[in-house]
Image (tube, helix red, strand yellow):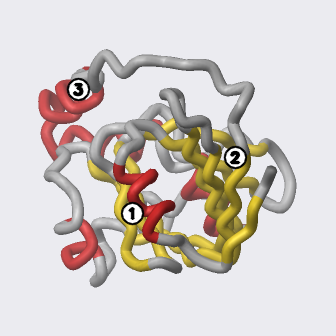
Amino acid sequence: MAEKFEALTEKHIEFIKNQHIFFVSTAASEGLVNVSPKGMDSFRVINNSKVAWLNLTGSGNETAAHILENNRMTIMFCSFDKQPLILRLYGQANVIHPRDNDWCRHVKLFPEYSGARQIFELNLELVQTSCGYAVPFYDLVGERPTLRKWADKRGREGVEKYWQEKNTKSLDGKDTGIIENV
């Protein structure tokens, strides 16, 4: 039932384009494992061996802390409609912050979001598909406007202040790198 690939195929890329949610999993050397659902228009296939996703400001910043210590990442997509499929992307990630030279080039791949916090690039080592026969059917009702409204109301300066207050440490007390020299 499971199949392994060295890189994304055109069929995989088309599947990804049709998904409205994906899940990101990371872990530091020790401590908690993090799995985060992601949505909005925040995922891009760069080529068949590299993807990127725009991380929007949230209550935690676990992924960033984990990648600083251990750059392994898994991204999972799963179909909730007629054709069952689970697609996992395994690889090594790096983080790009708004202060980094590469930010301007990469952020252009995505819509403008006031809450844009980091971009994660994942260099793929393995692509795996599996059946997804036990995944239930769900219908997309729509995107939630809450996060965008929250960030727009705060403005960029308010979002960055929130980073200082809430996003500099992980649940395990590890630095996230969101603020330089923190």
Corner quadrant of residue 32: top right
**Cα–Cα span, label 1 and label 2:** 22 Å
Q: What amino acid is at disc 2?
A: Gly
Find disc 2 in the rendering and name its residue.
173
Find disc 1 in the rendering and name its residue.
119
- Seen in the picture, residue 73 relative to 71 is either above or below; the reply is above
Q: Residue furthest bottom?
A: 101
- Pinpoint residue 71: horizontal percent, then vertical percent: 67, 70
Query: Nearer the observer, disc 1 or disc 2?
Result: 1
Mark yes or no: residue 71 visible.
no
Left or right: where does residue 171 sit relative to residue 60? right
Task: Using the image, tell me which numbered label, if any, was put on residue 1.
Answer: none
Element class at badge 2: loop
Mark yes or no: residue 140 visible.
yes
* Residue at point 70%, 61% (across, down): 128
Q: Nearer the viewer, residue 12 or 23?
A: 12
Q: What amino acid is at disc 3?
A: Trp
Query: Nearer the observer, disc 3 or disc 2?
Result: 3
Q: Residue furthest right?
A: 30
Task: Using the image, tell me which numbered label, if any, was put on residue 150.
Answer: 3
Left or right: where does residue 111 sit relative to residue 123? left
* Residue at point 66%, 49% (across, down): 25
- Pinpoint residue 31: horizontal percent, then vertical percent: 83, 47
- Pinpoint residue 26: horizontal percent, then vertical percent: 68, 54
**Cα–Cα span, label 1 and label 3:** 20 Å
Element class at badge 3: helix
**Cα–Cα span, label 3 and label 2:** 26 Å
Q: What amino acid is at disc 1?
A: Ile
